[in-house]
Amino acid sequence: MDFSLTKEQRDIKRAAAEFAAGEFVQELAHECELNHRYPREIYKKAGELGFIGLDYPEEIGGGNLGVFENVLVVEEFCKADSGLGMALHLGYLPAKLVKIIGTPVQRERVLAPVVKGDWISAVSFTEPNHGSDLTRVETILSEVEDGFVLNGTKLFTTNGSYADFTVVLAQEDPDAPPGQGMTTVLVERDPASWLGGTMEVNEIPHKMGIRMTSSSELVFRDLKVPKENIMGERGRGLLNVLDFLDESRIEIAAQALGNAEGAFLKALNHARERTQFKKAIIDFQAPGQRFARMWTKLQSMKWLVYHAAWLCDQRREKMSEAVALFTSMVKYHVPETAKGVIDETINVFGGYGYFMEQDVERRYRDNRIVEIYEGTIDIQLNNMVRILKKLNMDFIDSILL
C-alpha cells in the first residue's frame, strides 16, 4: 500500500502552490473582499497555466486526469488564501456537470472556453422552497415545437451575476413521482443564444463569507432555448445532479482542508515567534497541546479527502456503491472539523485574530459555507445512514473495514 503521490501529482501540487504564492497577494485579496469583486484576472491566469480542467478530455484542452489532481490544486489554492482559492475553484467547478453529462458538441462549446479561463460556470438547483429537498422543484421546463421554455426562480446561484452559463435543474413532468421527471438544461448568459423570453439576475448582498463571489437569484420568464441545450437524458435531471455531486463534494471538502491548513500554518508561525512572559507561546502547555490536537485533525481530514478522491477516480465495480458513502463522509467530516481548527487558530492570535489583517477570521467566514452548499452536513449524515442500511454486511466487514 503506497500513500505517496506520483511525480506528476507532486509537480501539480508544487506548481499550484507556487502560482498561489506569486498571485494571491494580501492586498488583492482584501481589495476583492471589501469590494465584492470576482478576481477574474487571476482566474484567467489559472486557465492559461493549466490549473482549470485537469479532469476534462484532452480534445477540448483538458488534462485528462482526475478528481484527485483537482483536489491537490484546490487544497493548495485555499491553503494560500481562502477567498481567492475558493473563488477560483467555484468559477470552474460547476462546469464539471457538462463534463459528466454533456454531449461532445456541448463540451466543445462550453468546456473549451472554461479551460482557457475565458468562461465562468454556474449551476442553478436551489429554489426559495426547495433547498435540501430537490425531489421536486417549481421551475418548469416545457417543450415547444422549436425549443424548450423555462419559467421559475432559482436562488443562491454562485457566480450568477457574471457566469457565462448555468446548468438549470427544472421539472419537465409535473405529474411525475418525487425525484423523477426532471431535466437539466444549459442556459447561456448571452441573450443572443436565447430564442425568446428573459432571464433576470438579482444579486443577493451582505453575506457572511466568500464575498469575492456573486450569489444570485435567477428569474426565468418564458426563457426559450434551443433543443440542443438539453443536457443528459430527459427525466433524469436529479440523477444527473447526484452524479455531479459525487465528484464535486470531494473537491468542496478540499476547500475546507486547504482553509484549515493555511490557518494552521499562520497560527504555528505566530506561536513560534510571539513571546509572552519571556518565552514563545507555543512553549506553554495549553497552547502547545492546542497545536497537537489541530495537527491530528488536519491529518484525519487530509487522508479522508485523498482516499475519497482516489476511490472516485478508480470507480472499481465492487466499490461503486461505496463512492457516495465516502462522498457524504468527507462533505460531513471535513468542513465541520476544519471549522474547529480555524476557530482554534483565532484563539492562538488572541485579539489580533479577530481582525481581517491576520486572515484567520476571514478563513472562518469563508469556510462556513462549506458546511452548507452542495448539501448540508445534516443531509450528508442522512445519506450515510441510507447507504449503510443497504450495503451488504459482508462487503462492509471485509472491504470497507
Image (cartoon, helix red, strand yellow):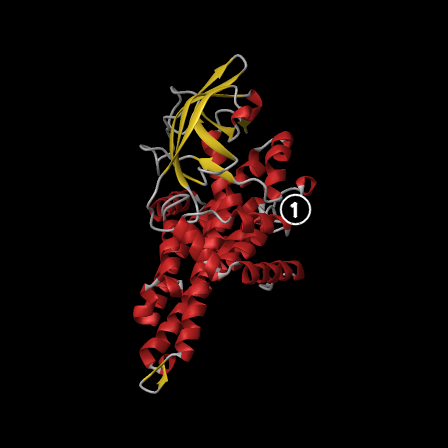
Q: Which residue is drawn at 64% across and 30% down?
A: 105
Q: Which residue is drawn at 38% across and 70% down?
A: 293
Residue matched to label 1: 64
Using the rendered view, name the quadrant where residue 298 is placed. bottom left
Which residue is painted at 51% across and 26% down in the image?
191
Nearest the eye: 45 or 265 = 45
Position of 277 relative to 395 (above/below): below
Quadrant of the frame with the N terminus: bottom right
Q: Residue furthest top?
A: 145
Q: x and y percent of residue 139 in the render?
A: 39, 26
Query: Is residue 328 something one can see in this rendering?
Result: yes
The amino acid type of the residue labelled 1 equals Asn
Task: Identify whether 348 is placed above or below 326.
Answer: below
On screen, 337 above or below 134?
below
251 sits to left or right of 279: right
Residue at (53%, 47%) from the top-left corner?
Answer: 40
For the residue labelled by badge 1, is the local secondary structure a helix, a strand or a loop? loop
Where does the image place residue 218, in percent across and percent down from the top left?
40, 31
The answer to whether residue 258 is seen in the rendering is no
Question: Foreground residue, 78 or 298?
Answer: 78
Q: Few, some or many C-alpha atoms within 10 Å of disc 1 (few <14, some 14-19, many ≥20)?
A: few
Coordinates of residue 43 in the picture (x, y in percent): 55, 49
